[in-house]
Image: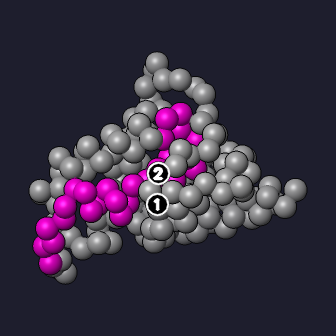
Amino acid sequence: MRCCRAVDWRAEDVYERLSPAVLGYFRGRGVHDPADLTGDVFVRVTRGLPRFQGDAAALRRWVFTIAHHRMVDEYRRPDRDLHVWTSDVPNQPGIEAGAGDADLVRALSMLTDDQREVVVLRFVADLALGDVAKIVGKRTGAVKMLQARGLERLREQLES
């Protein structure tokens, strides 16, 4: 068993480093209020940070696991607003809204839920295949196939 060196992570540093990617993850998944969910995630991260032990890669996996679970909770809420958020991100440090953002969000909405989840975790959250597989509860081979099909469909949508 590999032992990770304990790092004293500061909540401010973790937020600054990972909040743009978490916000992008929620935007890519089409949640109603991605900024609100991002805030919720980092409240939970801040609470759990004193007990967390691991390196930067483990921290990223942990934060995105929390984000994924928070998003699932939001979708399961019976009183949730079914509006899909597609507007540009407000100006925030580390977030640059490009002209193609709306096109990308629309193209992502054309993917299946599983394809969208995998593509966003792989390329927005920058997680490895194995990490994505653990988060979504699928085998690595299934994640590879979802990724390939999702990227192909994205390409088709963005070209048309």
Q: Horizontal placement of 12 versus 73: left or right?
A: left
- What residue would you read off at disc 1? 94
Q: Which residues are magenta?
A: 5-34
- For image coordinates 53% across by 44% down, the residue present is 90
Can you tell which quarter of the image residue 16 is in?
Answer: bottom left
Q: Is residue 124 highlighted in magenta?
A: no
Q: Amino acid at mark 1?
A: Gly
Coordinates of residue 52 in the picture (x, y in percent):
17, 60
Coordinates of residue 27 in the picture (x, y in percent):
55, 46
Mark 2 neighbour density, 10 Å: few (under 14) some (14–19) many (20 or more):
few
Q: Residue furthest top?
A: 79
Q: Is label 2 in a helix, a strand or a loop?
A: loop
Mark 1 neighbour density, 10 Å: few (under 14) some (14–19) many (20 or more):
few
Quadrant containing the N terminus in the rendered view:
bottom left
Can you tell which quarter of the image residue 115 is in?
Answer: bottom right
Q: Amino acid at mark 2?
A: Gln
Q: Horizontal placement of 119 versus 73: left or right?
A: right
Nearer to us in this view, 104 or 152: 104
Coordinates of residue 20 in the picture (x, y in percent):
45, 56
The vertical placement of 119 against 4, above or below, is: above
Q: Is residue 9 highlighted in magenta?
A: yes
- For image coordinates 12% across by 57% down, the residue present is 51
The vertical placement of 129 against 91, above or below, is: below
Q: Horizontal placement of 124 versus 116: left or right?
A: left
- What residue would you read off at disc 2? 92
Q: Are marks 1 and 2 in contact (CB under 8 Å)?
A: yes
- Between the C-alphas of marks 1 and 2, the distance is 6 Å
- For image coordinates 22% across by 56% down, the residue present is 11
The vertical placement of 134 against 78, above or below, is: below
